[in-house]
Amino acid sequence: MMGYVGKGAEDLAEALRRRNVWYALAMEDIADQYKRTLLGPFWLLVNYLAFAGTFVVIFGHNAAIHDFAAYVAVGLFVWLYLSEVILQSSALFLREENFIKGLTLPLSVYVLRLTAQSLIRAGFAMAGCVAILLIAGTLPTLAWLWSLVAIALIVVATPAAIINFAVCGAYFPDLQFIVTNAMRIGLFLTPIFWADNGGGGLRSAVYLWNPFTYFLEAVRDPIYSGTLPFHAFAVVSLIAAMLWLSALLLLGATRRKIVFVL
Amino acid sequence: MVSIRAENLSLVYRVQPRFSLGRSRVPFAAVGGQIGGKGRDHQVTALDGVGFSLSAGDRLGLVGRNGSGKTTLLKVLYGIYEPTGGIVEISGRVDALFNINIGFRREATGRRNIFLRGLVNGRSREEMEARMDEIIAFSELGDFIDMPLKSYSQGMAARLAFSVATALNPEILLMDEWIGAGDRHFQDKARSRMNELAESAGIVVLASHNEPLIERTCNKILVLEQGRVLFMGDKEAHFEKGNASSANGG
């Protein structure tokens, strides 16, 4: 088992050495997608603002949550990032079939290419998120630094999550459709627009057992309530560690075999 | 010294049995070879006991029908497939020209594509920048080099691909179904570059159904059938034996 982890780490280390490859490809991907458009990648900012803005305007009045705009802006920003990464990664190796069958790049190159792409996209959404916070009157405090730490933690966990979903998706292509449905439902089951009112029951159970809750809390709480959500940080760190262990294991065990199942 | 040695090389893989409610389709298409196994559990023997050795200056022609294992062998030599048995020993830097469109992006200019193609093939930024002018000159694309690739004809794209792959002084070059990039004039240029390459202590392995091309380009021939070596030796022996046309029937 440790042998597999070592091989997985080798693959990743090789990809890190060849960072100019995935960085260049990620930039091309973004540029290609918005070629010949007026706004270019600023569409990413518009997408986010339209989505978050609509929610705040429509549901903001009767919400039981104070500072609804800040709550939604941060929660939605984190959720959109996580769901995009997961959605994109379950079919990653299927999409990269031509490259995988024609080149000898380590699989982690494709993983880091998607990571870089997702981070660039998230950068635009983050600008929108900060804009909403400022407009809503939530001014920066030192506690925001904890949110940055939480974001860094999520970024660190991203390649691991991608590897897990990408390897499973290569062997089990149904995964991409399962994930599409799960993410659609997850938008409602994750506390983005609602909070746990502490009343117990189904809503509290969903809040407690949904792992996405903790990713949102870790980033949101320092900005929203100025507190350090220690519990959420612990859960996110634990999930990240588990994701990395299983990612390296899966990668090491399958990196030479995936080319045959695509 | 550049060399390739393969001994008793085999590649057998299991086709993963998949549960599916959808209409069942042939579950394997990636690699040819012999199919064995029972029920849903299939095994494909793509290469079976392949052995040969090549040294500097050799130009090996891989011939055989569709599905005989030519591409698979090239991919094993390149390192895309890990053999399940036997030994491959390669000394020298390997470059491959399998799919001429790989790593090319339609929206990017020819110049940018040269750079990207170099990167995905493991070359550094500096190396590519140093070679850029030479590659552009060889491709004869002129002002088109700063136009997006989507404005190129197929022949132009092939010329660009060939120029990048061969301009980097590969010590070992693997080519699959290279049907001759560009027009007659460019093909002559390409052929002389391939000769140069092989003469400058390189090895070329070329898989093709194009018999005249193989005869002109190669000095050794390896005939594959169902993943096994049917013939391996000098070009003259192969063409004298008259098995050329039967092996190229596919």
Image (spheres, helix red, strand yellow):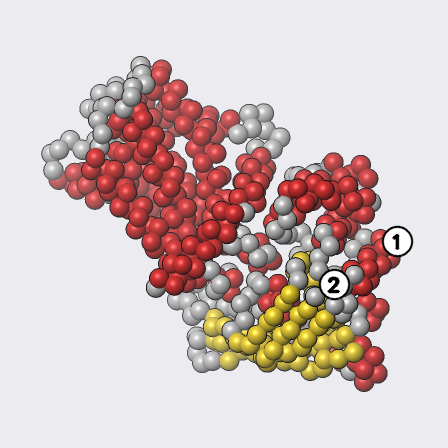
Please determine whether, in this image, residue A112 is positioned above or below residue A196: below
Q: Would residue B206 be visible to someone looking at this image?
A: no
Above or below for B206 versus A43: below
Q: Position of residue A201 (x, y in %)?
A: 13, 40
Q: Depth check: B223 or B66 in front?
A: B223
Neighbourhood count class around disc 1 (C-alpha, 10 Å): few under 14, some 14–19, many 20 upward: few
| CA–CA distance in space, label 1 to label 2 | 24 Å
Tell whether B160 sits left or right of A174. right
- Residue B36 lies left or right of residue B88; in this view the side is left
Q: Is residue A60 left or right of residue B160?
A: left
The residue shown at (38%, 54%) is A247
Q: Chain of mark 1?
A: B
> Which residue type does callout 2 highlight?
Gly
The numbered disc on residue A57 is none
At mark 1, the secondary structure is: helix
Question: How far across and how far down the image is residue B23, in percent?
Answer: 46, 65
| Residue A214: percent from left, percent from top | 25, 38
Q: Is residue A84 above or below residue B56?
A: above
Is disc 2 on the same chain as disc 1?
yes
- Pointer 2 chain: B
- The numbered mark, 1 or 2, whose residue comes first in the sequence reads 1
Q: Quadrant of the C terminus of chain B?
A: bottom right
Residue that numbered label 2 is attached to: B202
Q: Residue furthest front?
A: B1
**Which residue is tagged 1?**
B185
Q: Residues within 10 Å of mark 2 (few under 14, many from 20)?
A: many
Q: Hey, which residue is sitting farthest bottom in the picture? A: B241
Q: Which of the 4 image quarters holds residue B96? A: bottom right
Nearest the viewer among B82 and A94 is B82
Cβ–Cβ under 8 Å for marks 1 and 2: no
Question: Toward the viewer: B1 or A37?
Answer: B1
